[in-house]
Image: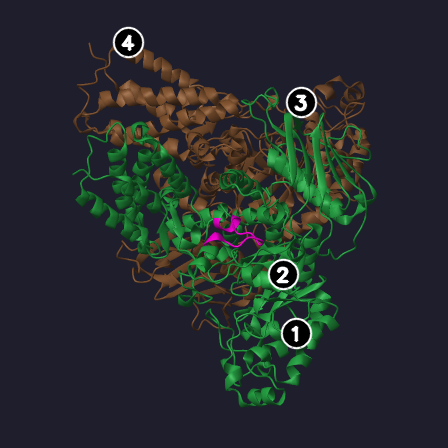
Chain colours: A brown, B green
Amino acid sequence: MPWPANISVQPGSIPITADFAISVSGAGAKDPRVTFAVDQIWPRLARQTGQFIRPHLLPTSEGATLTIVVEQRDHKPPQRLGDDERYSLEAADGRVRIAADYPLGALRGIETFLQAVQQNTNATGSTNAASPGFAISNLQIHDEPRFSWRGLSLDVSRHFIPAEEVKRTIDGLAAVKLNVLHWHLSDDQGFRVESKRYPRLQQYGSNGQYYTQAEIRDVIAYARDHGVRIVPEFDMPGHATSWMPAYPMLAARTGSFQIAPGFGILSDLMDPAKESTYRFLNNFVGEMAKLFPDEYFHIGGDEVAPRQWNENPRIQAFMKKHHITDAKALQVYFNQRLLKIVEKHGKRMEGWDEVLQPDLPKSVIIQSWRGQESLWQAAREGYKGILSAGYYLDLMRPASYHYEIDPLVLPPERKALLERQNKPIPAPLTPEEQKNILGGEAAMWEELADAENLDAKLWPRLAAIAERFWSPQSVTDLNSMYARLAPVNRWLEWLGLTQRSNLELMRQRLAGSMDYAVLDRFASILEPVKGYSRGAGRYQTNTPLNRLVDSIPPESNAARQFRDAVEAYLAQPAAQRNSDQLREHLTRWAEDAREVRPILQTNSLLTENLPAADAVAILCQTGTEALLSLDAATAGANPRDSAWKQRSTAAVQDASTRKGDLLIQIAPGIAKLVDAVTPAQ
Amino acid sequence: MPWPANISVQPGSIPITADFAISVSGAGAKDPRVTFAVDQIWPRLARQTGQFIRPHLLPTSEGATLTIVVEQRDHKPPQRLGDDERYSLEAADGRVRIAADYPLGALRGIETFLQAVQQNTNATGSTNAASPGFAISNLQIHDEPRFSWRGLSLDVSRHFIPAEEVKRTIDGLAAVKLNVLHWHLSDDQGFRVESKRYPRLQQYGSNGQYYTQAEIRDVIAYARDHGVRIVPEFDMPGHATSWMPAYPMLAARTGSFQIAPGFGILSDLMDPAKESTYRFLNNFVGEMAKLFPDEYFHIGGDEVAPRQWNENPRIQAFMKKHHITDAKALQVYFNQRLLKIVEKHGKRMEGWDEVLQPDLPKSVIIQSWRGQESLWQAAREGYKGILSAGYYLDLMRPASYHYEIDPLVLPPERKALLERQNKPIPAPLTPEEQKNILGGEAAMWEELADAENLDAKLWPRLAAIAERFWSPQSVTDLNSMYARLAPVNRWLEWLGLTQRSNLELMRQRLAGSMDYAVLDRFASILEPVKGYSRGAGRYQTNTPLNRLVDSIPPESNAARQFRDAVEAYLAQPAAQRNSDQLREHLTRWAEDAREVRPILQTNSLLTENLPAADAVAILCQTGTEALLSLDAATAGANPRDSAWKQRSTAAVQDASTRKGDLLIQIAPGIAKLVDAVTPAQ
């Protein structure tokens, strides 16, 4: 994962043993990225296989298990948009061979190789049963990405993410062949970069939580070694409160400022009507343009609440004088000035949807949080853009949801809505226009997450999104995706990612001295509420994120598998239905809900979850009754009347609503079961 | 844990919230160890509580939640044996206060404080139900260690343990108030330290796996900040094969040498009959004495197989000339020479039991792997010593086993054996002689462990041993120990220790694409075989340690709890016996054994464990039958005849034997149940 553009698997496999050796050749072999990636193969294979695999680099391909050929040295740093990432991987006749024209391709191929090393199984004829251990199947892969911009936008302002965790995230990005980390470095809640020119920015704007320039450089070098570009974002003129405690003169209002303790679209804006604002930004952007080598520079530009501009007489006078008709036009003016500054310092500008206004030069890249229509509109006008709408990981949607979003396809629900509203359906982009869609970026906003559970918010869902960006458009099968997502998720853990282990620690912390295994089982069918319904407005940046909702994954595998099993059950002819397995699940979950009650009752941080336990008990009871009534063997003996159906439908409906910040995700499956019961009489 | 020397708990508690603050005062407040420990309190509390606790240091105690008073600056580095570690901890009236005469005491007190911060529960009257979160109970502690030398001997030769893991181990040592890391740096399988004077030592003796001197210094500084001494050991004249590939002239035989790939008491020895040996050692010890600041220097001295000395005519001639009667005496000669070298470079010498020979100066410290009798003998002769026998963590014994070993008490089985053999029972040491017992050291030998599962071999058992070394001799209750060990084990995980998480990863790796939850449950009642019975002789240093036996803890909590529950059940009057819970366990384990079978069958690394699954099935079946026959409600309906008893006894006996390298630890409990059944007729 991501699934390669072309792959064919042959019978047989190649064992990967302790004497595993590598040879690297070609003009690109000395590229530092290749050297770094090759150096990582041994320890990563050692961890993946538990064998004492130690560096064994051969000058020629003689005797090597893995041959890596990199034809050309290519591109100097920094890595650029569109750099060639193609590679081929062949495993046959006891040898593995990765070939790439350029270093980046070698990096991508190495990840594919490592992911393909799996345990030998005894059962299938195609693997070597006599050699217990690990192997790679004989196969041929020719691979290249569908999109050239495949990123993650990471908010480190609302809750700070230390450099160590950012590097760990880069490990994950590279593993699933993402190539951009869009670093959202400033927002209302914190300014996270050391400025030497304006050190008060971090002193007054970060509560001490910021990256030094040395750390930034270290992260950039780390990313480069992993074939990942770092695109910095400094959000302006809104989402900029954290600049103002140090530099109130940047603000559109007077008075004193503090870093925002809460979340939302705040009212403070930069002042676009003062020359001093642009002088400041010119110096600041100049400094940051040197610090961040990437050719792109993201200026944010989203969610400007215009009140302060509209209510400031000086700004109004400025607008009048310059024939600027409204706040929107004033932001256009601000962006035009900013664009000149950004370009003066040798960068291309990138911004969110809102920066797309008449007269915007075509060189600016549009990042769309609004959706395909907005993005396509820009593409038709000749702008290049990337899609982020539909890929917001903070909204706690399942992997399948994100996986089905395609930058080049209008989501079916959206299409249906437009049809219902008799609105025109946008035509698909022409092949020429499609070239303006560079790719997409997942986004992780940190209002309700922090470094402790970041990994669990990102992984494994981000791997599914990575496949959307890399693999051919035709790779869309959800069952295949989920079947591959689980092992990829485990594979990512060998990189040190903590999506599972940190949540376990958090649940242990919650359980305190009590039995956390019970809490784990109880939590396994729960999910956080979706979208914005948890209500970041109820939180401040220092509100502890140490509740049950913070310590469970966005998606419950157990609940999803139960829902699938219910559908399979109901799809069977009535005479063949056997619900033993489904009922066993329900029995266990009911038991968990019963056993977890004393823990929830005693534990001050868990008491709020008692209604969830009660609802689970009701759901399991109702589901069991429905199944006995639907089962071939017991249907006759367990008739349900319409009063039961009415009562049960209401009970399931109630249990399906949020319990605190939690959803019980077996509820939809149980609703289907109740619905399928035909009442007697 | 370790349980304090004096503690009293009062009703009420003090909430630990995000505005937690600290003040530090006293002449010792500026000690770098105190500064370091205080700096760690905030992030550790943040992790332990999930609250955004950020540094908040107050110049005075005004408003502080925690006041730390350190009276004196004391001891300069290096920390010395016997440095004062006393402290008091008081929590009352909304304030916490740690007081210590010296910095080390403050470090110990801070660990106690952190361990005492626990989740507020709702149920007990003594905690604040209205404030969900974390708190410390009102209490008073006056604490000091029983022994001054409380260590871990860590073998990094047989499998290398990288510096990062050594530092993580030091985190754990400090947390449970151990104060010595005895670093076993050279052995037959690897020489692990960079020598600048003799760089070929590490070049030819380590396969590239060694610590640079910079790393060594870094680890020493880290240990010092944690109040832990680092005592280096270079094992001589045996266990020294890894010196010889580089310097064959050190050896008692001629020919070529390689690092030992296997384990055991090997035949290669240093040559004590050559002056050049002592010149070399003088230079080497001189270099290492500078690198390692501790006052003690461990020269090993154990397990000398004398054949090479006995068979070498030159050495025999040397012995004759110097009136050295046998190999033992030759080792005495070698040790005397080595002692002079060690002392010349300003160090005190330490060695294993074997170095204790007539004429050994009283300044040498004896580390006893042989047991109390050997140690006491030395103490009676005026030598100072520490006990390691009984604390070997590589032998996979339960925490209770180690916990019951006391340096000042002859183990009951040993006493019984001596009685049976009509041998004299050694008298207890007099109070004066007891002073010669400095403490003890757990030992972790790495033949069958490596960095991946090191933590699981150490923790939590090492915490129980730490309690033995620190707490009063009277603290011996096993139930209390186990009840406290579980939460301490979880608490240690917040330091980054991986005893649980890494084993989980290893079992996931084993499961491959299959359901690892089933494998986890199956493994939960298994333990590795005990003592030396796994047979390190069957292994080489590069044999993968990636099997099921490598990925389970030394002690199964589930199995221990089952055995306890069986005893409680059998202790009840027959008319009141109810085995519902016991049978539920057996039913689940039987189910796990059934469900895990297809995984074991398919998986090349797990197939060897099929007999264990079969044995679990038999045990659960037999246990259930026995219980139904013993239960008050069903006894009459489930009579067992003597044929059943005979058959079942044999079956349980067979299931109790090792299955591969595994033991099924519910077997003893089930044997008791079968034994309790009175056959009908």
The spot of residue B16 in percent (x, y) is 66, 29
Question: Are tags 1 and 3 found on a single chain?
Answer: no
The numbered dot on residue B359 is: 1
Magenta-drawn segment: B401-413
- The amino acid on which the numbered mark 3 sits, given as a three-letter code, is Ala
Tags 4 and 3 on a common chain: yes
Q: Quadrant of the N terminus of chain B?
A: top right
Q: Earlier in the sequence, mark 4 or mark 3?
A: 3
Dots 4 and 1: beta carbons under 8 Å? no
Q: Chain of mark 2?
A: B
The answer to whether tags 4 and 1 share a subunit is no
* Prevailing secondary structure of the magenta residues: loop
Whether B419 is drawn above or below A183: the answer is: below
Q: Is residue B407 magenta?
A: yes
Assign a secondary structure to mark 4.
helix
Mark 2 vs mark 3: tell me if same chain.
no
Element class at badge 1: loop
Amino acid type of the residue that numbered disc 2 sits on in the rendered structure:
Gly
Labels 2, 3: front one:
2
